[in-house]
Image (cartoon, grey):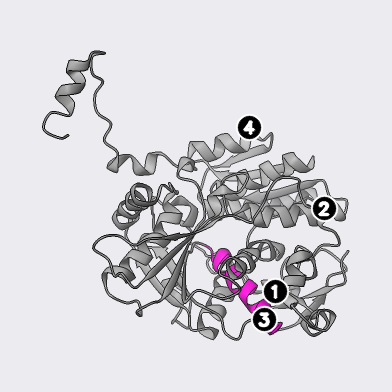
Amino acid sequence: MNDKFIFKCVDCGKTYSASQIIYLCPDCEKFNDSQSPPYGVLKTIYDYAHIASCYKDKLFDNLSQKGFLDLLPLNSLNSLPNLKVGNTPMYHIPLFDDAQKDVHLFLKDDSQNPTFSFKDRASAIVSAYAKENNINTIAAASTGNAGSSLAGICAAQKQKAIIFVPAAAPKAKITQIVMYGATIVPVDGNYDAAFDLSIEATKKFGWYNRNTAFNPFTIEGKKTVAYEIYAQSGQSIPDRIFVPVGDGVIISGMYKGFEDLLKLGIIDKIPVIVAVQAMGSCNIVNNIDSEKFICIQGRTLADSISVDIPRNFRMTKQFLLKYAGEKLTVSDEEIIAASKVLSSRTGIFTEPASAAAFAGFLSYLWNGQFEPGSKNLVLLTGSGLKDLNAVQPVIDIPAPVKANIKAVEEIFKGKI
């Protein structure tokens, strides 16, 4: 096991050694029930003062050259899969004709990870940790992306993956899981039911569990996107970052990465991070300013962020309040419209969850909420090929024509 970090409970503040596998704070876990986000989620803490002292000059450059190993729960980068995870492109996109000319838009396209999802960042770290500790079987619950990610990464690492998915998960994602050779367990219920069943099975059979907001290393994997954004921005930070939010782990990972840089003195502030949720599933946004969590069951076509009980709610709330984050919701209609705009104007086709973040950006843009000259980044987390059914309402495929030039002339008559 690794002794270069410790775990700290986000609720009671108690710390735990990393000498054994631990998921939630044992003291706070006792208060958990099936109707509320769990207590006892653990944060991974490093000796930041020691790390900074090891590299007096060009701290970030030195950390980057070592693959940020000092800030990861691993002993060696060789434990990671041989697939290219992370280091995804970040594009500076000219704004549209009718938009503010002095607002800068950047797109961080994590659909270019091996399984076409941001979730590969988390799966790679969890898999590498398992490899270093001679663990061969990893289980997870997923609406599709995390499951297909773990399945693909485990295939590359010669590990066994067991994936619990809601039976209604998109066929493309289920297909990925099966093609990667994982054992799939369709569950007659939603993501929360699959999540709970996967944990029960983990305890029963002694598997290692990758579940987000349960395994603390998922956040350690996802935080690496913050390091890349800082590097790709010329060692600076954007003014705002729009992040799609479901259970709260992606946005917490983003915050954790920037918080690492803040604690090391590499940056002096954290960018404004905007939590974007679908109106049909917005239990984080709805409860941020409430003393008691109230779950409203809902539904959205953005299945990747459709969650009734956001498992990482408490950490997400802490981050948003501590660092003055912002929040908004977008409708399914806005999500699909944003997906169409993004695809047709930039050449990037993302799944509805990614499009939700872009819809949030568009909402700010059309409402004049950006400061002149501001730099704004949208995190795109998954490929549009993951869920083709969702965009069918905005797709118009014409009927076939006869194979002769006259038929083609009729199509373009008066148009060219």
Question: Do tag 1 and tag 2 residues touch (Cβ < 8 Å)?
Answer: no
- The residue sitting at 73% across, 71% down in the picture is 61
The reply to whether residue 12 is in sight is no
Query: What residue sits right under mark 2 in the picture?
Result: 79
Residue 222: x %, y % from top left = 63, 62
| Number of the front mark, 3 or 2 | 3
Marker disc for residue 263: none
Q: Is residue 138 magenta?
A: no
Calculate the distance from the C-alpha at mark 4 to the C-alpha at mark 1. 33 Å
- Mark 2 element type: helix
Q: Earlier in the sequence, mark 3 or mark 1?
A: 1
Residue 228: x %, y % from top left = 62, 65
- Mark 4 element type: helix
Question: Which amino acid type is shown beneath numbered disc 1?
Answer: Lys
Calculate the distance from the C-alpha at mark 3 to the C-alpha at mark 2. 27 Å
Question: Do tag 4 and tag 1 residues touch (Cβ < 8 Å)?
Answer: no
Q: Residue furthest left?
A: 414
Query: What residue sits right under mark 3 in the picture?
Result: 266
Q: How many marks?
A: 4
Region of the chain picked out in magenta, as a range: 247-265
Q: Earlier in the sequence, mark 2 or mark 4?
A: 2
- Mark 1 element type: strand
Question: Which amino acid type is shown beneath numbered disc 2?
Answer: Ser
- The residue sitting at 38% across, 77% down in the picture is 373
Q: Which of the two residues, 107 or 117, is positioned nearer the viewer here?
A: 107
Calculate the distance from the C-alpha at mark 1 to the C-alpha at mark 2. 22 Å
Query: What residue sits right under mark 4 in the picture?
Result: 179
The quarter of the picture where the N terminus appears is bottom right
Q: Which of the two residues, 100 or 156, is positioned nearer the viewer here?
A: 100
Question: Which amino acid type is shown beneath numbered disc 4?
Answer: Met
